[in-house]
Amino acid sequence: MSTSGKTDYRSLIRGDIPPWVMRYIKSVGKTINTYSMIKENDEVLLAVSGGKDSLALALALSLRLKWLPVSYRLRALMINWIEHPIDEDSKKRLYEYFSSLGIDFTMLDEHQFPSSFNGDFNCYLCSRNRRRILFEYAAENSIRLIAMGHHLDDLVETSLMNLCFRASFSSMLPVQDFFSGRLFIIRPLIEIHESVTKRLSDYYNLPVVKPVCPYDQTNIRSQLKPIVKSLCHIDSLTREHIYNAHHFDTDILKNS
């Protein structure tokens, strides 16, 4: 135990994995297998935000390698916005975390507000900028798989945003193809509830760092969270129903 009353994540790496954490890891593995996300000798780039979800994803992908009959390689990339830099203590804890997991970790200093924005800034532009940096890094290092930490709650909120405000029943995909199959985004946490990654992060004292976001508490996604929670009081499987309504293709990566 740490002095803060939390359990150190290194106990998981040493093999002390309680049943609820094992269920989480196996659930991630089930999603990976359902959508054929990762195969033997693949190299996967983890898109690290510093939040609980991407750190929980790194933990699952690393730990499951201990008993898998196949092997894959993991690398991690985090963008450090020059306008809102991460403090040195947080950087140190992140490097220690990924080193403990055996994952090569890189942090890039980039501008959150590039000149191409012409002074504009919103969630869409920020996301597009971050994705551009990830894609360029993946291309430079001949990596075709980028794993993101989006979970079931993210998918539900995106579905409602698109349905209510864009007249489209669409959402983020478990596997998303770019550039005619030269690059794929995979989302191994897409069937995992946010409450699970929060519990994991809190209990095991993951080195979470929250980069500054000007719209963190005011964007549409944050306003939808209590609405989704209210719907789940009516039917606890609301999130799963929305997920299943999409009928996602499971063959995108199978033969690529």
Image: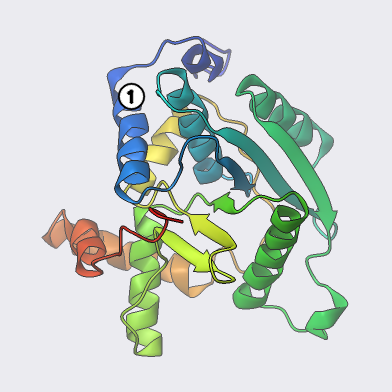
Residue 167 visible, this angle: yes
Image vertical order of residue 103 relative to residue 196, above or below: above
Residue 214 visible, this angle: no
Query: Looking at the image, which is closer to me, 30 or 6?
Result: 30
**Identity of the residue drawn at 34% across and 51% down:** 35
Instruction: Measuring from the top left, give residue 224's x and y in whole percent.
Output: 38, 69
**Identity of the residue drawn at 56% across and 13% down:** 2
**Identity of the residue drawn at 63% across and 68% down:** 127
Instruction: Give the labeled residue for mark 1.
Output: 22
Give the residue at the far left of this rendering: 235
**Identity of the residue drawn at 56% across and 30% down:** 206
Quadrant of residue 43 within the rendered picture:
top right
Circle 1: element type: helix
Instruction: Measuring from the top left, give residue 204's x and y in whole percent.
Output: 49, 24
Query: Looking at the image, which is closer to me, 42 or 22?
Result: 42
Q: Amino acid at mark 1?
A: Met
Quadrant of residue 130 within the rendered picture:
bottom right
Give the residue at the far bottom of this rendering: 167
